[in-house]
Amino acid sequence: MPTSKMPSTYGVLRAHGVDRRTFLSFCTKTAAALGLGATAVPDIVKALTTEPRIPVIWLHGLECTCCSESLLRSSQPLVQDVIMNMISLDYDDTLQAAAGFQAEEIRESIMAQYPGKYVLAVEGNAPTRDGGIYCTVGGRTFLDILQETARDSMAVIAWGSCATNGCVQAASPNPTGAQPVSALIKGKPVMNIPGCPPIAEVMTGVIVYLTTYSRLPALDSSGRPKAYYGRTVHDDCKRRENFMKGRFVRHWDDGGARNGYCLFMMGCRGPITRNRCSTMKFNGGTSWPAESGHPCIGCSEDGFWDNGPLYQMIDPALALPEDHPLIGNNTDCRRCHD
């Protein structure tokens, strides 16, 4: 159960054997990832040293748990440091030991003890058709639990594409009436962290920002933090040089594929997808789809499941024509999207 007075992040880290040098290194890297610069490091250090950890309630709706799986592979910092040290993850029905009525009592106690001070993280979306009965927890609809928990929260983080844009659950014909979190929560700041899954270190970064400044970072028109979604995947892709020179993969495992040519002709949505996949990568910075030879499917963008060019490869009738303005021209890929 939560206590009325929580220790600071650094206090818990120090108790677990983390030295000052390592702590300062983490603060510096986080400031850089958020695009805040060196001048913000003292603010982060002060906040994580003096401010109590933020209570977090993590709800799961219609989703596949890939967002949690991504978080479990966070390397900077390790996930155990995030869950045990950086935040006070008091409720997560996927990770916690408690179950049933005991688990719900924990959620309700946090809401009662910390009104306006806890963060609601939501993984998945909520069905709205037929009163939302297609996702229930303890006899209550997830829609009802979501709106109840959001009511007294400090802010809401929609974690993953299911929560931010509906993902496969909201794909046509959307039989359950699944809706993203931002469409269901009103009167509270909602920050979208899209991706299927999103990058683990992005979650830790936005939590540090919340702890430091008690507000959400600057968001774009889609409610995404600009620091992580301000550039397209294509902007920093190592295959971009081949795009500029008109060198494309045209068939799986052809010579172009073996030489690392651009995957645009194979349905890559990198030019119109905003994310940090090509720089931060996944699984501790090991790799990302285009690096391993698979085109970006644009999972950070609305409607990607129904409208992704990847599916043009399934139906040849939808393939891009040879006279498409991006093919064979040494021009920037935003030409037909601006």
Image (cartoon, grey):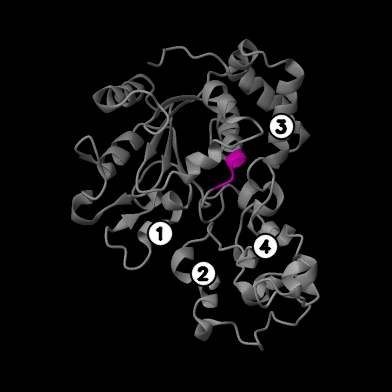
Q: CA distance from mark 2 to mark 1?
A: 12 Å
SS at circle 2: loop
Closer to the observer: label 4 or label 1? 4
Q: Position of residue 84 (x, y in %)?
A: 53, 21
The residue range painted magenta reads 198-202
Q: Dot 4, crowdedness within 10 Å: few (<14), some or many (≥20)? A: some
* Residue 272, quarter of the rendered image: bottom right
Q: Which mark is residue 293?
A: 4
Q: Amino acid at mark 3?
A: Ala
Question: Mark 4 vs mark 2: which is more N-terminal?
Answer: 4
* Residue behind mark 3: 40
Q: Dot 2, crowdedness within 10 Å: few (<14), some or many (≥20)? A: some
Q: Amino acid at mark 2?
A: Gly
* Residue behind mark 2: 308
SS at circle 3: helix
Q: Amino acid at mark 1?
A: Val
Q: Which residue is most to the front?
A: 253
Question: Mark 2 vs mark 1: which is more N-terminal?
Answer: 1
Q: Amino acid at mark 4?
A: Gly
